[in-house]
Image (cartoon, rainbow, N blue to C red):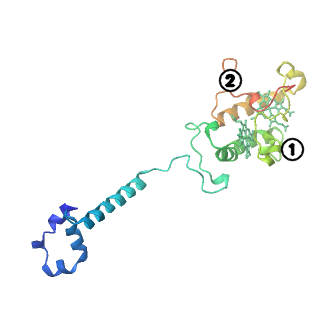
């Protein structure tokens, strides 16, 4: 502020302009520590400048609350950075809509185009989706009994589930798969429940 005033030393300004310019007077006045209103004005300017800098400096965070209710428009964070279970409910729904359904639909429809013609949230989550319930695992899916699978289910169905559905879903969710070494990994029981449960 005062540096500017220095350059505008009265001797270098045509007298008539200096007299007529209230703006210049204010600038020059700001260099006079005795003028309280000028100091106040200068402080206000500083505050405004600080606020502007803060506003420009803040980057939008990837988890910014969505502006609309349309899940298709929700901007999702990278699944490598924010795991699925850390998303809020709206983002979970958007993730299912944007990532899960489009990638899982062909797996189901290629397996049985007729049974899964209407593939969607309901296929995995059941009828409760209409009440906004998406709890997993879903006890309405076929019950599993690992000791008796081969007599109870078609081999082709088990292979489809074990080689396509489970690994693809685990990959979309960015979760390590269930195995003997990793019993807590993503597996059949993320979606199905066991017989008797
Ligand atoms: C292929 C099966 C599949 C489909 C299709 C699917 N989901 Fe999911 N969904 C899952 C699984 C598995 C989980 C559990 C993931 C986890 O917690 O690791 C899940 C979890 C969720 C959750 C979080 C559950 C909670 O705890 O609240 C919501 C919400 C959700 N799904 C909504 C949807 C919506 C909406 C759709 C349709 C647009 C949909 N899902 C389609 C398999 C599916
Ligand atoms: C992402 C969720 C998900 C995972 C993981 C999953 N399933 Fe499924 N499974 C389903 C859905 C959805 C169906 C279709 C239910 C229907 O017919 O409407 C299904 C159907 C089945 C069926 C019945 C097939 C038929 O046509 O009658 C069997 C058996 C089965 N799953 C076994 C398994 C086994 C074993 C695993 C683990 C290797 C597994 N599933 C993993 C969602 C899943």
Q: Is residue 108 above or below residue 9?
A: above
Badge 2 density bin: few <14, some 14–19, many ≥20, Cα 10 Å: few
Please name the residue shown 70% across and 42% down the image.
100
Q: Where the N terminus falls, by quadrant?
A: bottom left
Which label number is shown at residue 17?
A: none
Taking the image as four quarters, which one is ligand 1 found in?
A: top right
Which label number is shown at residue 184?
A: 2
Q: Quadrant of residue 17?
A: bottom left
Work out whether mark 2 precedes mark 1 in sequence or the reverse, and give the earlier one. 1
The reply, left or right, for residue 131 in relation to residue 40 is: right
Q: Position of residue 52 (x, y in %)?
A: 39, 58
Q: Where the C terminus falls, by quadrant?
A: top right
Q: Is residue 26 above or below residue 122?
A: below
Q: Quadrant of residue 83?
A: top right
Please name the residue shown 86% across and 42% down the image.
115
Please name the residue shown 53% across and 46% down the image.
62
Q: Position of residue 77 (x, y in %)?
A: 57, 44
Q: How far apart are the two marked residues, 2 and 1, measured between alpha carbons?
A: 34 Å
Q: Quadrant of residue 114?
A: top right
SS for dot 1 = loop
**Viewer-closest of 132 and 157:** 132
Q: Is residue 142 above or below residue 51?
A: above
SS for dot 2 = loop
Residue linked to disc 1:
114
**Viewer-closest of 175 and 161:** 175
Badge 1 density bin: few <14, some 14–19, many ≥20, Cα 10 Å: few
């Amino acid at each position: 502020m005062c540096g500017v005033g220095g350059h505008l030393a009265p001797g270098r300004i045509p007298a008539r302009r200096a007299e007529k310019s209230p703006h210049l007077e204010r600038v020059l006045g700001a260099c006079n520590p005795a003028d309280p209103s000028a100091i106040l004005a200068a402080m206000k300017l500083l505050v405004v400048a600080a606020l502007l800098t803060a506003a420009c400096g803040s980057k939008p965070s990837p988890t910014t609350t969505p502006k609309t209710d349309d899940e298709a428009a929700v901007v999702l964070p990278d699944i490598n950075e924010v795991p699925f279970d850390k998303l809020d409910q709206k983002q979970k729904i958007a993730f299912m809509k944007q990532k899960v359904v489009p990638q899982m639909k062909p797996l189901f429809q290629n397996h049985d185009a007729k049974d899964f013609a209407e593939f969607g949230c309901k296929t995995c989550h059941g009828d409760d989706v209409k009440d906004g319930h998406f709890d997993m695992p879903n006890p309405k899916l076929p019950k599993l009994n690992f000791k008796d699978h081969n007599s109870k289910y078609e081999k082709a169905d088990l292979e489809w589930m074990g080689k396509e559905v489970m690994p693809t879903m685990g990959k979309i969710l960015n979760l390590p798969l269930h195995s003997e070494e990793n019993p807590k990994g993503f597996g059949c029981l993320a979606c199905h429940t066991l017989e008797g449960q």
